[in-house]
Image (cartoon, grey):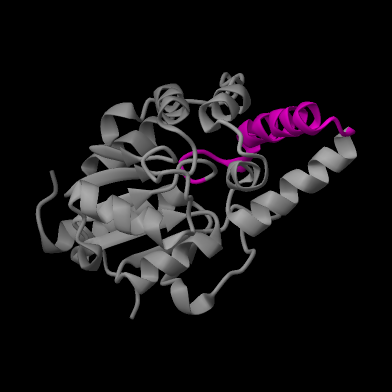
Amino acid sequence: MPFDPTRVDFWIFDLDYTLYPASARVFEQIDQRMGVFIAELLGCDAAEARRIQKMYFHDHGTTLAGLMHYHAIEPREFLDYVHDIDLTGLAQVPRLAAQIAALPGQRIVFTNGDAPYAARVLDALDLADCFHGMWDIHAMEYRPKPEPSAYSGMIAALGVDPERAVFVEDSARNLGPAKALGMQTVWLDAATDWGDRAKDDAAIDIVIDDIGQWLDACLAELAETKPLG
């Protein structure tokens, strides 16, 4: 079934590389700080730290999940360290803010990052007032997307009807659990090295490469069928 915006009452967005482009290089800073954290934790060199970091990311969904599993680290210490970055590379996007604000229903950020970092990003983008709720790694009890509990927990806590929801995400592997619950799914192909990892075409309703163009199309279709706002 093709994507149908008229069936959506809950608009769920990933944060990193979904609400801002990969060209902002925000995650490159986080990536670098993860490597430093691991090197200091394990007493290894940078190359070994990077190998471990990526292994944990691919095997456990996030580097943090792997570190908690194998090394019992305190998650808030890690998250505070890796998110202590410069966000001046993020530019405000008035067009995107207007588009998201015009979407009817509830608008939610669903991120494997933590709420303090996500709030800083949304403030830098001037998107903070566009959303009604957030589900972060703390709320997930550190079991990140694509762990099914991350999705079921959000649905229960925020009152989401998955049959009336769409999930927009740049990591294709994170769409499978959403699709299994009945959500419509949108893969934002940001042309990153990891975006298509474990991609399941059957779990993706539509592929886009420009979130603004897609939202314009959604709003135009909605305007033809029901009033917005």
Query: Where's the N terminus, which quadrant?
Result: bottom left
Residue at image x 27%, y 37%?
A: 131
- Left or right placement of residue 8 versus residue 77 in this view: left
Q: How many marks?
A: 0
- Compared to 196, does 136 lie above or below? above
- Left or right placement of residue 42 versus residue 114 in this view: right
Query: Where's the C terminus, which quadrant?
Result: top left
Residue at image x 49%, y 60%?
A: 174
- Compared to 226, does 48 lie above or below? above
Magenta stretch: residue 35 in it? Answer: yes
- Compared to 99, does 210 lie above or below? below
Q: Position of residue 62 (x, y in %)?
A: 59, 47
| Residue 214 figure quarter | bottom left
Q: Which residues are drawn in magenta? A: 18-45
Dominant SS type (magenta): helix
Q: Nearer the viewer, residue 203 or 116?
A: 116
One can see residue 164 in this view:
yes
Residue at image x 22%, y 47%?
A: 158
- Left or right placement of residue 33 versus residue 26 in this view: right
Q: Nearer the viewer, residue 157 or 202?
A: 157
- Left or right placement of residue 125 versus residue 8 in this view: right
Q: Position of residue 224 (x, y in %)?
A: 16, 62
Q: Position of residue 205 (x, y in %)?
A: 41, 72
Residue at image x 65%, y 31%?
A: 30
One can see residue 103 in this view:
no
Q: Position of residue 18 (x, y in %)?
A: 49, 46
| Residue 141 figure quarter | top left
Magenta stretch: residue 143 in it? Answer: no
